[in-house]
Image (cartoon, rainbow, N blue to C red):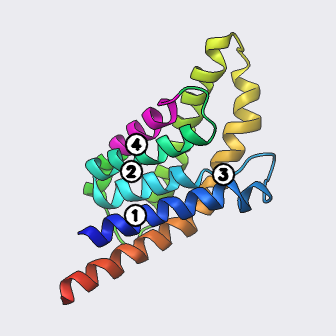
């Protein structure tokens, strides 16, 4: 059990480092894939609501400390996304990638809308169409594509840890 927590924490740190360093240089359409969101959605889908909530909170706090304007905003957004996606654990299929990709892109859309409301709409900037076409949509596509690879990696790690625990 402790191994799963350590591995999840290492995955969070690696995703954060990749998102803030390497992928900053791999921008497409001026957006970067949201790897921490992929981590939250993946673990919530694989492990359920509680893990989605906890991992979402940790990832959100890391983002808040990195560059958030308000402490707790990213934590709230990722926590709520992780909790809601955790309900989909009932529909978990190991070989099917369709539902995880839909969950990742839909979660990125929800994240983009939350971010728009809290950072732009509250300040009187009402250009949702422009923000959707130039930020939310490209980020959804980029995050969905990169999310497939990261999700596969997380699933492989989970199966490896489960197999090791069953053998012991």
Which numbered disc covers residue 57?
4
User: Magenta region's main secondary structure?
Assistant: helix
> Label 1 vs label 2: CA separation?
8 Å
Q: Earlier in the sequence, mark 1 or mark 2?
A: 1
Q: Earlier in the sequence, mark 4 or mark 1?
A: 1
Span of residues in magenta: 71-84
Pointer 1 and pointer 2: residues touching (CB < 8 Å)?
yes
State the residue position of label 3.
Answer: 141
Q: Secondary structure at mark 1?
A: helix
Q: Is residue 105 above or below residue 10?
A: above
Q: Position of residue 60 (x, y in %)?
A: 48, 42
Q: Is residue 106 left or right of residue 167?
A: right
Which numbered disc covers residue 46?
none
Q: How many marks?
A: 4
Q: Earlier in the sequence, mark 1 or mark 3?
A: 1
> Label 1 vs label 3: CA separation?
25 Å
Outermost residue toward the front? Answer: 65
Outermost residue toward the top? Answer: 124
Q: Residue at x 62, y 59 (%)?
A: 17
Q: Residue at x 74, y 19 (%)?
A: 127
State the residue position of label 2.
Answer: 55
State the residue position of label 1.
Answer: 8
**Tag nearer the camera, 3 or 2:** 2
């Amino acid at each position: 059990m402790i191994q799963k927590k350590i591995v999840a924490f290492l995955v969070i740190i690696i995703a954060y480092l990749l998102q803030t360093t390497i992928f900053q240089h791999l921008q497409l359409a001026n957006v970067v894939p949201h790897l921490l969101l992929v981590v939250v959605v993946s673990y919530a889908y694989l492990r359920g609501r509680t893990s989605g909530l906890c991992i979402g909170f940790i990832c959100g706090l890391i983002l808040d400390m990195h560059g958030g304007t308000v402490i707790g905003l990213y934590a709230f957004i990722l926590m709520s996304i992780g909790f809601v996606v955790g309900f989909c654990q009932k529909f978990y299929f190991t070989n099917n990638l369709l539902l995880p990709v839909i969950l990742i892109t839909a979660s990125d859309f929800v994240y983009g809308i939350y971010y728009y409301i809290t950072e732009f709409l509250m300040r009187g900037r009402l250009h949702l169409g422009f923000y959707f076409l130039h930020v939310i949509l490209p980020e959804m596509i980029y995050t969905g594509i990169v999310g497939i690879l990261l999700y596969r990696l997380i699933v492989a790690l989970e199966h490896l840890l489960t197999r090791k625990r069953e053998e012991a």
